Image: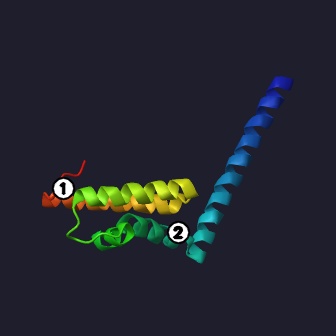
Amino acid sequence: MAAKILANLIVMGSGILARAVVQAYRQALANASKSGVAQETLQNAARRVSKSMTEQEARQILGVSEETTWEEIMKKYDTLFERNAKNGSFYLQSKVHRAKECLEGVYRSNGDGSPS
């Protein structure tokens, strides 16, 4: 008899809890759509995907021109990367690395030099 009552209490309690969770989720969605959070999140995600480094920006970061050879670019990259590793600027270090990756793609597609 006690087991049956306990089982009924557990079932009823879980049903009440499930309804409360669903209601809270619906309310959160309504609040998000009213405040524009959902649209803002989608827009930010789209910006992150579409925003990649341009060749011009990569050249500015590494301080090289269009006539610079791949070997010179690698020397600049190594110097800047190590300098930022010592001073602890991970952000600048990552920018230098992304710039090298961008130019590596450009040099591969053009067939200039030998990016490795």
The quadrant the N terminus occupies is top right
14 lies above or below 103: above
The image quarter in which residue 7 lies: top right
Render colour scheme: rainbow
Residue at numbered disc 1: 108
Find residue 99 and report its horizontal and vertical position in percent. Answer: 35, 62
Q: Looking at numbered disc 1 in the image, what kind of residue is underneath it? A: Arg
Residue at numbered disc 2: 38
Q: Disc count in the image?
A: 2
| Apparent side of residue 3 relative to residue 101 in the rendered image (left or right) | right
Find residue 55 and report its horizontal and vertical position in percent. Answer: 28, 69
- Residue located at (34% from left, 68% from top): 58
30 lies above or below 94: below
- Residue located at (36% from left, 66% from top): 62
The image quarter in which residue 104 lies: bottom left
| Apparent side of residue 86 relative to residue 78 in the rendered image (left or right) | right
Q: Dot 1: within a 10 Å radius of its alpha carbon, few (fewer than 14), some, or many (20 or more) residues?
A: few
